[in-house]
Structure formats: C-alpha cells, structure tokens
Image: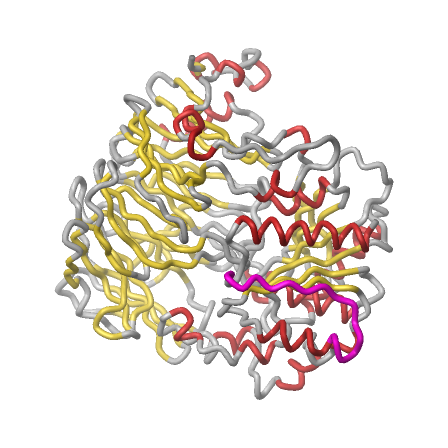
Amino acid sequence: MTAELAACEGSAGELPQGLLARLAPPLLLTVVSAMIAWTPPGHAGELPVETFFQRPSFGSVQLSPSGTYLAVVVRAGGRDNLLVINLAGRVGRLVTAFKDADVVQFSWVNDKRLVVAEGDAQEASGRQRFFGWFAVDRDGTGWKSLGRFRSYVRPASSGGDDIIVIDAGRGSTIYDVYRVDTRKGVRALLSFDSPGDALDWVVDHRNVPRVAHTYLKGIHTLWYRESENSSWTKLDEGADFRLHFTPLGFDYDNKQLYVAARGEGDWTAIYTYDFKSNNLGELVAGSAGTDIDRVIWSRAKRALIGVSYQGDKPGVTWIDSDMIKLQNNVDRALPDTVNVLQVAAENPLRALVFAYSDVDPGTYYLLDTETLALEELGKTRSWIDRKQLAPRKPVRYTARDGMEIPAYLTLPNDSTEKKPPLVVIIHGGPFVRGSMWGFNTEAQFFASRGYAVLEPEFRGSSGYGWKLFSSGFKQWGLAMEDDITDGVEWLIKQDIVDKDRICLYGGSYGGYATLWGLIKTPELYRCGVAFVAVTDVSMLFELNWYDLVGSPYRWLDYGARDVIGDPVIDADKFRSVSPLVNAERLKAAVLLAYGGRDQRVPIKHGNEFRAALDKYGKTYEWVVYDDEAHGFNKDENRFDFYRRVDAFLKKYLH
C-alpha cells in the first residue's frame, strides 16, 4: 500500500491520521534480510553497546539514471557491500562480497554499470581510506580494476561506459584529467596542457578541463581557459584557506561558472563568476548564519536546481520551481524529519527521499513525483526505538573574549538526577565541521547512560563563517581549548550539569584537546577518554605527509606552519601546550586507545605519553587494536572500545 502525498496539500495540522503507518512494508529489509537480519541483544534497563554502534543495515542509496534500479550499501559478511535491486521485480543481487574492506563510495555510470571504491569506512578524522576503484555491471559481472585515482568526476557521456577521473599520471606530483574506459581499464589523458602542478580541476560538460587549481611551495593558484585551445589565465592566488573563491562547476551551457566565496562578508555564499571583470558576479544563494558551498545539478533539466547547507540544522534552497513544490509536498507528509530529495538523473518522475532527525536515524522512501505516491523502502537502524533517543539541540554560548561558539547539547531523557554528569565530545580535524545536526551515535549512547553531552564547534571549526574558522589559526591548546572550557563553565553556571562529574572525550585532534584540557584546567574534570590522540604538536611534523596521502600538497611544510605553527620558531609554544611534555601535571584518570597501523597519528604518540604517565605514577587505562589504523573499523574492536568507555565513565562519573 502507498500513501498519497496529493492528499496533503494543506498545512501540517491537516495531515490524515496514521499516514506513516499506512506506508508499504520495508522493501530493502525484506530483500536483504537473509544477509543482514540482526537484532542487538537486549535486556530490561540499559541498552547494550551494540544497539548504538552496530552499523546501519544499509547506508548510501542511489537510483540508477533511469530510476529503474536501486544500488544500496548493505551490511554483509561483517563489511559494507553493494546490493542492486530491480525495482520492477523487487529482486536484489549482491554485487560485491568484501571481507576485508568496505564499499566506501559508488556511482552509477549508466543503468547497467557502476564504479565502486573500496577501503576502510571509518576513521577518527572523519575521512575514509581508499584502496582502489573498480567497475562492475549491476548483475555482478564485468568486473574491471581501475586502480587508484584521486577523485571520480562523472560519467563521460549519458549512457556510455566511460568516466572522467582526476589522478596523477605524468608524474607523482601532478594531477591530470583522464577519460577511462571502464570495460577495458584504458585511460586517455585530457589535460596535458596544464598551467602547473595541479591539485584539482573543474571539467565542463564537454569533458574539457577548464579550471585548474595548482600548488607550488605553499601557494595555491586558480587558472581558467575559455576553451580547449585557449591559453590559461590566472584568476586567483593565495596561501592555504586564503583563496578568494572555490570553483564548483560549469552550467550546462559550459559558459557560466559557479563559485563559493565570502565576498565582502563573513559567510560563504554561491555566486556566478564574471570572467570579463575577473571578479564575483551575481549572488545565487547566501545566508548570514551559515556557509553555503554545495550546489545541486539536474542532468535531466541540464541546470543548477538548488544549493544545500548545514547551518545549525541542514536544509536545501531550491531554485527550480518543480523541486520547491515537491519538497513542500514531502515535508507536509513527513513533518517531523529533514527530508532529503534525490531525483533520478535522467527520470524526473522517480526520486528517493531520506527522512531523518536527531531522534530518528533515518528512513528511505521511493517517491513517484507524478502521482506523489510515497513508498517506504526501509529504516537504516530498525532496531532502535526512537522513543528512547534524546533531542540534540543546537545552542550558542559566549567565549571569554566575546566570540559566539556554536554547539550541540543533548540532555538525557528521564534522568533521575537534577544535574546529570557531563561528557564533552571534542571533534577531530580540527579545521573541519565537527558535526551535523541529526542522529549522532556517540551523543545518544552517552545520553542513554544518563550523561549530558556537549559538542562544541570551537574556533577553527568550519561552516560557521571565516571569523570563527580563522580565529583558530595557531591556537592549539590556547583559545581553541578555552572555547571548550568556556562551554563547560557556561553549563555549570546555567545549573544544568554536575560540576564535579565532567569527562572530556575525543579522537585525533579531539584526543589532543582532551589530554590538554585535563592538564590545563585540572579542577574541572574527573576523567578523559582520548583515542588515536596527538600527544605532542611538534611530533606531528615528523610525518612524511607526501608519502601518507600521495599528494604534492605538502601541508606540513607550508599550510600547517601557517595555521598550526612552525616547529622551530614556535618550539617553546608547542612545548607549553604539549600533553607529553606536561604529563606530570595530569591529575585525572585517562583512557587511551590507539590503532597499531595508524599513519596519521602513529602509535609513537601513545607509547611516549604512556611512558611519561608510568614515570610519574599516573592513573590510566590502555588498549591498542593492532589491526586498526586511525579509527576502529572492525565491529569487534569498535564494540570493545565502547564497552571500555562505558565502564570507564561509570567508574569515574557515577
């Protein structure tokens, strides 16, 4: 049975009763139940760790260009694999069977063929590790290894088997654009006429590389050419994070370039680019409250149809009138969730809807945009009872210097304590967006244990404007740490949490900030959990970043010295904010966890810090997962880690 959105043209208050209950039974879970059916062990009272940290039954979902087939990342054999479903017959076929890797990215080339990237799906930095790409037909045949490449751009033409990719070829420090035959694995170079050592390219819809982003000794340069036979013209130049705009893509006329830029303000917005004046053109979409830097294209309409943003809560501003109407209809039918629309690339009559919220991990629906019939495909985490989840609210507080700091606050449901203990989740990066609004496994896990949870977007975090972001430059352990402290003290002053039961928690940079927070303000914290944690800033610069990421972008030689500091010039400052150097001052108990194969933060950070803790007789717990890298990817390791965290917090916060 399907639900008709056409009956929901009125306000949210006029929705028919039991609309969601009348939707069709979950299709995906029926199709793949033999492979992924799983229910976490349950018992009265506290929810088990697996309830939160078992991966979703299925993840990314994409319609084929015609909307006839559905490709879904499902949990099979303990890893993320790819399932393709024929929507006409509701028949599914597993096209990958990885046992030591995950499907971390995929895309339809045409209705018959897909390209798939394999790698490790989880890293503490929020990044995925890529092992390589291959192509496969939707029936699981026609496998062809495509090797490793930097990024996948798009199909070379509608219906064909070729794709456009960006990769190193003429030299290990130069990226070029290639047309790849996914049947033969043969590459054809498209960008030999390059203005320099390119990090990235923008390719127009005729498959001509038109904008190049080059890099040399810390300087980024943007170049443009009008056609394949034109000479290159310099558009912009600057050090890391200091280019005046980011090119996003050409319109289907291959003339209009869209860019993300701050213009004269603090917030990134979408503009056209005026090549005659070599400056920003018309404002397409902007907001004084959130950075907007993502555009949405329609292959069927051959046009830019919208922009998406995060803000305190995510959303989309549609430019296309049909999409505005469609979004309004879906939002009326599903009023309690953020509803993300994905229309089939070459069939505007069929779309996917992903509906989620802070207390709903998400449900996928199939939508007929002509009849407005909405059919439920399945819930990503069907075993979670939404009633047991706690609201995760965007909040703002003021730092000691007057800077406004965004954050998310989650308070436990039905807490028996007037002022619950607090866990502060510190994101990694650190020059990234820490978290988005929606279902957050760690926040919900801690809240289920009776803890309040604060997730600060301290200065240096992206997505909230240039001022907040750039104020974090060279502030490791200083103002960045003060922002976290100020958030904790704000909650204490508001009489929301117990000032005597507070724990810091974080990985990577978040692990560093956890350890340094315990040392810098020992009177505030009872304990800390630091995993894959940086323990000394200077030690970061011992990495060979080129070998690590295989890129000419020598971050540690240039960019890192600009935004973190110079290990020689700033040696004294680095020592003053080093958990390793100042380990003697640690008073709180700490849980340390590392991956034995971590290259981003080698285990040397943990081993030397542990030796210092032993030297000074400090209280700590220690675990190493030998087969993990910068994050805990295997289910058994992830479950073990969070059981240890659970026991550790109960020991020191109850």
Task: Assess whether residue 466 is covered by the magenta stretch.
Answer: no
Where residue 409 sits in the image (x, y, percent)?
Answer: 70, 45
Task: Tell me where residue 266 appears, x and y as whole percent.
Answer: 54, 58
What segment carries the magenta color? 613-628
Please say whether residue 142 is visible from this viewpoint. yes
Task: Identify the residue at horizontal 40%, vertical 46% (top origin).
Answer: 284
Q: Nearer the viewer, residue 13 or 166?
A: 166
Q: Quadrant of residue 225?
A: bottom left
Residue at the image point whose x is 17% and y is 69% from the top: 192
**How is the structure coloured here?**
secondary structure
Residue at the image position 80 percent from the left and 61 percent from the top: 525
Percent x, y for residue 383?
Answer: 58, 31
Q: Is residue 394 above or below residue 500?
A: above
**Can residue 325 be seen here?**
no
From the viewer's perspective, tell me whether residue 492 is left or right of residue 484: right
The percent position of residue 57, horizontal first and vertical second, equals 48, 36
The answer to whether 114 is drawn above or below residue 613 in the figure is: above
**Quarter of the rendering containing residue 509:** bottom right
97 up-or-down from 564: above or below = above
Query: At 27% across and 64% down in the image, what residue appears?
Result: 167
Q: Nearer the viewer, residue 225 or 459?
A: 459
The quadrant of the rendering that contains the N terminus is: top left
Depth order, front residue of 220/227: 220
Q: How many labels, in total?
A: 0
User: Is residue 618 highlighted in magenta?
Assistant: yes
Q: Is residue 221 left or right of residue 642?
A: left
Q: Residue at the bottom extreme?
A: 568
Q: Is residue 444 above or below residue 534?
A: above
Task: State the residue in front, 59 or 206.
Answer: 59
